[in-house]
Image (cartoon, helix red, strand yellow):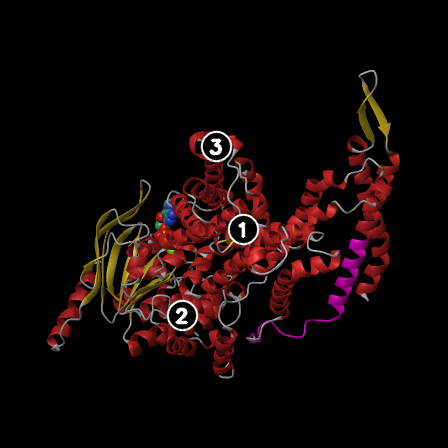
Amino acid sequence: MAAATRGADGLTGILKDAAIYALGAFALCVPVVSFRTDAGATGGLELTPRWVLVAGLCAAIFLARLAQRLVLMRRDARRALRPSRSQATEAVSGTPNAGQRVSMLALWLFIGVALTLPVVAALASGSLGEGRYWIDLGILILTYVMLGWGLNIVVGLAGLLDLGYVAFYAVGAYSYALLSTTFGLSFWICLPLAGLFAALWGMLLGFPVLRLRGDYLAIVTLAFGEIIRLVLINWVDVTGGGAGISSIPRATFFGIPFTAGEDGFAARFGLTFDSMHRVVFLYYLILALALITNVVTLRLRRLPIGRAWEALREDEIACRSLGINTTTTKLTAFALGAAFGGFAGSFFAVRQGFISPESFNFLESAIILAIVVLGGMGSQVGVAIAAVAMVGGPEMLRNLGFLKSIFGQGFDPNEYRLLLFGLAMVAMMVWRPRGLISERTPSVALGERRAISGAHVSEGHG
Amino acid sequence: MSVAGINVLVEETRALAAGKAPAKTLLAVRGVSTYYGSVAALRDVDLDVTEGEIVTLIGANGAGKSTLMMTIFGAPQAREGTITYDGRDITRLPTHEIARLAIAQSPEGRRVFPRMSVHENLQMGAALHDRRYFAQDLERVCALFPRLKERLTQRAGTMSGGEQQMLAIARALMSRPRLLLLDEPSLGLAPLVVKGIFDAVRDLNRRDGMTIFLVEQNAYHALKLAHRGYVLVNGRITMSGTGRALLADPAIKAAYLEGGHGAPVEV
Ligand SMILES: Nc1ncnc2c1ncn2[C@@H]1O[C@H](COP(=O)(O)OP(=O)(O)OP(=O)(O)O)[C@@H](O)[C@H]1O
Ligand SMILES: [Mg+2]
């Protein structure tokens, strides 16, 4: 009965509420949107009124708020009617819950799509060359997936907020670029070296920040990222300064170059030469690197060191009094996260063939961190989904040409990238403040877990 | 104070007379002072824990009980004095190395790992330990706290305060300590649960021979349980003696037993 009365006076209330939102939107629109300023012929400003747009925005906000309230009302009503069946004080079962199963499914789905993407792209668009756009986009997304997974070790697992992760990406990229252009070393030798150098830099950053946590740690890592970038710009003799390093050797198929000649990849394998072979190879290379990052992380999570990272994130003091050396635990987290950043960096260099400090600014760090946070700190699947959304999403904006018919010819969806980015962030923080996949899967293997609960649960209660 | 001191002497003489070898001192705190910045939290503290004993430390809020416990664990480190454990000077040892000497602690405020499951928390407790013993030790702590048995897969942060307290103690036990330090295990718990925890402590001591150093506000229960007790006032030890002697001491009665937090609760 209570629900019914609430529903009745609720409806007018909701309408009123939505109207207030629309009014608020109108008030905001008047100074911001309602006039477009153009430099007129005489040099003064010309104001073009855009009241239709304002009305459209207000109506959209009214409807959105209305829909939100109605959905919430129905959900509340449903909850009130149907009490939860299980009592909180009952024993907890060891079987994975729906959330965990969904995220396992999502991981396999992601891997499946990733593995078949070049083939699907080629089939869908007629030829490999036509599908290049999609494969390139795939490479870009996978690079961020890998960076996200790497940073996830530091931020998600060990709980150390790192705002300068791009520094290790840069170290990896410059390691490959310098080693290959100066000493002529091949990519396959440089790749582990790049990871090693990045790991060393990770430790170097780790030492001074051992005692720091939270905000202070964030500030120091932010500064570290900037220092690396500034060194790259100013140490012109070695790094080429702002001009960067160009003509970095291209990737080879384990020593076989992707060229049209006799020794080329195509000739050796009896294929007709296609410049897309290299792109497809790069795609599978970054996919393999990303998956290695994932597998290593998942395995480490079950080993003592991975546990120690998570315990460190939860409570450093308790960690220490359980005999865990927090110094080495932190340093390994920094070093390992950095190593994966370094791998990704050298991949970046070999793919681009050209690098400059431009590519390693703070915005990159911010994007990688946003991927980890949006993904739900510590969740591998969440990070992958967030990377697809954050990197792939803005690309999709290019294809939203139909919006021109609504907002006029001058409308370019690309200009609104950052706005949408911000909106997405705000929406996420409101509805899923712990990230897309906030459910943490216990690292104990299921079989083991079931065995234990089976052995104990049946015996006595409290 | 003198009364209590004499009491200890009397006990020791009695033990000697009975022909028992005096047990070995496991933990010896000598002249320890600890500072937070320039503020002294502990001043010239002397304290002994003999192997196989339950020793309790009582005192008002802010007396420095938790500080003493943490000083034994090396965080913060003592500025003056020495702490010896099993004949070894541990005053300057880092916390994690102290933890490896078979000393375990259930710290103030429980400090369980909230996002980890109960089972994982217990695994963290056994982190230093041979994995072979894990199943056996798990069995043992689950027998001690059957409540945990039902909740192995629950996230520790979602458990009730009392359950978390049990988990904190169980986690400390997973490393098979010789010396167990407990900081206010009864804080905020219902009388029945307190009794359960104190019974568990007694069991650990009597049955397994574990040495226990117990910090408590609940002076009545603690003194009744302990072989010996110390009283800490403003960072100094002002009294010590057998649990029974301290319980009977009029000064203690007035300060810690009548009314207030430490009032006897019969259950
Ligand atoms: N980290 C710290 N920094 C500065 N002062 C501290 C710190 N920790 C404790 N103190 C001070 O040291 C004194 C002793 O604190 P402690 O926590 O040891 O008291 P306690 O006897 O355990 O009290 P309670 O019964 O309330 O737990 C208090 O005055 C407290 O304010
Ligand atoms: Mg205390």
Q: Is residue A6 visible?
A: yes
The residues tagged by marks 3 and 2 sit, at their Cα atoms, a distance apart of 59 Å
A195 with respect to A400 (left or right)? left
Mark 1 secondary-structure assignment: helix
Q: On the image, numbered disc 2 is attached to which residue?
A: B170
Image disc number at residue A147: 1
Q: Residue at x 46, y 37 (%)?
A: A228
Quadrant of the drawing holding the N terminus of chain A: bottom right
**Residue type, numbered disc 1:** Leu
- The residues colored magenta run A67-92
Mark 2 secondary-structure assignment: helix
Going from the N terminus, do you reach mark 1 or mark 3 first?
A: 1
Front residue (pair A34, B32): A34
Front residue (pair B159, A22): A22
Q: Is mark 3 within 8 Å of ligand 1?
A: no
- Name, please, the residue furthest toward the right: A52
Position in image of residue B93 (x %, y %): 26, 54
Label 1: chain?
A
Say above or below: B21 vs A358. below
A4 with respect to A452 (left or right)? right
Q: On the image, numbered disc 3 is attached to which residue?
A: A240
The residues tagged by marks 1 and 3 sit, at their Cα atoms, a distance apart of 25 Å
Whether pointer 3 and pointer 2 mark residues with C-beta atoms closer than 8 Å, the reply is no
Mark 3 secondary-structure assignment: loop
Q: Is residue A91 magenta?
A: yes
Front residue (pair A229, A381): A229
Across the whole image, how many numbered discs are drawn on residues?
3
